[in-house]
Image: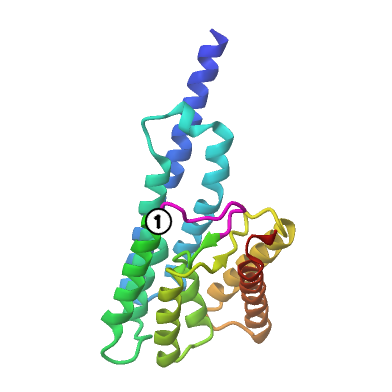
Amino acid sequence: MSSGVATQERRLAAAAVHALTASGVVWAFLALVAAVRGDWPVMFAWLGVALFVDGIDGPLARKVGITRVLPDWNGETLDLVVDYLTYVFIPAYAAVAAGLFPPNFGVVGAAIICLSSAAFFAKRNQKSKDNFFIGFPAVWNLVLFYWMIFDTGPEVVLASTIAFGLLTFFPMHFIHPVRVVRFRNLSLAVTMSAFVLALVAILEELNPDGWVKAGLAAALAYLLGVSLWRTLIGERE
């Protein structure tokens, strides 16, 4: 009897994790409403909520053994649906709506974002054995955030869009701050610090003080530095 109760409890826990993942579509909708209004701080706040949920649902799913408890429900597919909305589609729309691209290049930029990301999401082998992403992992929500925080010019926005779009198809390794074991404690500390700084920037209407921008730039430099390091050392580690 007790095992039956435990099984039911595990099923409820697994269902709760799926519901948590699915809540991402709600945060995506609220972010889109804010983007349509041109309220970028609120948009990033909702995208931040979605990012936080995306960061914790995976460990929770593994903890409850979700694939064994609810084998008829595919949490990875659900996660991909949510991620495409929050990481790709809404940032692409926001970049165009905010006029970040050069005149007459908005649709081109959005197409690069959406198409390259669709290709990445369709890849069977997205990660290396040590859990680095292989190719740019379509984190356009973060790219958009840095574009807006640093008031990036249209030409640089377009050039970086092309560059990241191309890197989707190249074997550059990008760090996953949670899943990569090497430097994990430092990576988590940097990521959490950047999350706090991003919150400060949002509260300051995306026009933060210089120390906030410096901290965000340092966090980006660390993550890209580790990614470049892993790319260069190849399989020697």
Q: Residue 105 colored magenta?
A: no
Q: Is residue 22 above or below residue 102?
A: above
Q: In this view, does 155 lie above or below 206?
A: below
Q: In this view, does 19 lie above or below 179?
A: above
Residue 21, percent across and down? Answer: 44, 46
Residue 125, percent across and down? Answer: 46, 53
Q: How crowded is mark 1: few (under 14 residues within 10 Å), some or many (20 or more)?
A: few
**204 sits left or right of 158 in the view:** right
Is residue 51 visible in the rendered image? The answer is: yes
What amino acid type is highlighted by mark number 1? Lys
Q: In this view, does 44 lie above or below 205?
A: above
In-front residue for pair 208/236:
236
In-front residue for pair 88/30:
88
**Quadrant showing the C terminus:** bottom right
Prevailing secondary structure of the magenta residues:
loop
Is residue 22 visible in the rendered image? The answer is: no
Q: Residue 131 colored magenta?
A: yes
Residue named by callout 1? 123
Q: What element carries label 1?
A: loop
What colouring method underlies this structural image?
Answer: rainbow
What is the residue that sits farthest to the front in this orientation? 236
**183 sits left or right of 41 in the view:** right
Residue at coordinates 63% horizontally, 79% vertically from top-left? 217
**161 sits left or right of 190 in the view:** left
Range of magenta residues: 124-132
